[in-house]
Amino acid sequence: MPRRRVTLFAALLAAPLPAMAQSAAQSDARPDSQPATRPAAATSATATAATDGWSWRNDRPVLSIGNGGFTLSPLVRFDVDGALFVDQDRGGRAAGFEDAANLRRGRLGVRGTVLDAFEYNFTWDLGGNPATSNALFEASLGWTGLGWGTIRAGAFTLQHLPEYAGSSFDLPFLERASVTAITASLASGVTRLALGLEARGDRWNASGYVTGQVLSTRSDDRARGLVGRAVALLPELGPVRLQIGLDGTAQFAPGTSPGPDTLRLRDYPELRGANSNRFLDTGGMRTDTAWAIGPELAGRIGPVYVEALYQHIGVELTGGGSRGFDGGYVTAVVPLVGPPRERNRSTGTWARPKTRGWIDPANGNWGALELAGRYSVVDLRDGPTRGGRQRIWTGGLTWHLSPNLRLQAQYENGSIALDGPDRSFQAVGLRASFNL
């Protein structure tokens, strides 16, 4: 990316922050509805007054020591998946997507607060598929002393793009849309080494980071990037409550994986099979700069939750020339049983519906049941780079049995346009999730 465009990009990401910081003094620190994904600074007063010992807060056990000066909460997350691929038109090719049963996530860790002004998280992931397991997922420390924002450092999941900004336990589908995963691979995503500010107010959120490598990727220590996200709630119009925003990222050094100064954009078909086949794949591109930018929209129309994202990706090739790719998705979630989704003020995302303890059908408590649909598309074809174009229609059901347990089922109908015959497929995915 030319220097002038880099400067313009940085200015665009930074522009909303001064005005937002000015209005932060009038904001309290309470989430709209759901507790924050990470320990929130707003809970410090409650923690200080807490009795030492174990207690149950925000649907998880918490150990408090020194009148709340130190807290510790165990972190447990298990996603057990099954995937079945059927009706695969492989275009005369032998390889395809394979059925699977796997532990998609198997996270164990601890998180908590120190001296009412710091929060920490150390988590190991024993799951992952295919070809990845048993790796550090998060090791981060955040300072919440600003009140209106958190300065965070370490390896963690950045608040960038709506499907990454909140908890993966809030996602209405088994996997994020491919455009989200591909964009995040530039400089954000999970387990990314970063230093940044996560700011928030009653009606806005803004985050910005300088980033390095993905800690779980070996020999990638030269990666460098900038990441930003800004969202704001529009004035309510009857039953319509919408939030608009902008997400941007720039990679100024791609690191050494898959090769020196090489970028490779690819993804699974929004469901993980037993093999590592990713037919949506640009192959390696020699580059020193890549970037992505685009709008997001999320909110509720009555009880129906809607979310949309578009991203344009640019790659400046070493020795001259460039490539341009794009993609996006549209999602709708309808509550069939239980309350609708509510906005989480700490992350600027719309969290899963609240449930009242464990389901109790005898007393009319069936938890929460959601019906979701998504259309996603991503096009990685430009000039001689023939990464393919993927289109997937997905429908899913999520049954929230309690605040910590849910069951999911989804159906996919997709196609991948390559040079030559397209690859079409259908797939069914199942998941049982526990989150503490």
Image (cartoon, rainbow, N blue to C red):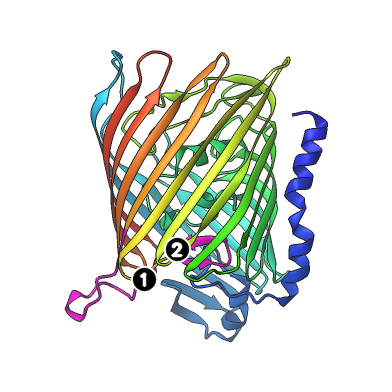
Residue 202's mark?
none
Quadrant (top left/top right/bottom left/bottom right) for the N terminus: top right
Amino acid on which the number 2 mark rests in the picture: Ile
| Quarter of the rendering containing residue 321 | top right
Q: What residue is disc 1 on?
A: 339
Q: Residue at x 44, y 79 (%)?
A: 55
Q: Is residue 36 left or right of residue 279?
A: right
Residue 311 position, x and y percent, is: 58, 39
Q: Residues within 10 Å of mark 2 (few under 14, many from 20)?
A: some
Q: Is residue 61 left or right of residue 37?
A: left
Amino acid on which the number 1 mark rests in the picture: Pro
- Nearer to us in this view, 275 or 84: 84
Q: Is residue 10 visible?
A: yes
- Nearer to us in this view, 401 or 90: 90
Question: Quick one: SS at disc 1?
Answer: loop
Residue 399 position, x and y percent, is: 28, 61
Quadrant (top left/top right/bottom left/bottom right) for the C terminus: bottom left
Residue 127 position, x and y percent, is: 39, 44
Q: Is residue 97 visible?
A: no
Q: Residue at x 55, y 34 (%)?
A: 217
Farthest-out residue, left: 362
Residue 399, magenta (yes or no) = no
In space, the residues marked 1 and 2 are separated at their CA atoms by: 14 Å
N-terminal-most mark, 1 or 2: 2
Q: Residues within 10 Å of mark 1 (few under 14, many from 20)?
A: some
Question: Quick one: SS at disc 2?
Answer: strand
Which stretch did the figure color magenta? 342-370
Residue 257, compared with residue 397, is above or below; it is above
Residue 301's mark?
2
Residue 432 position, x and y percent, is: 29, 54
Residue 202, compared with residue 420, is above or below; it is below
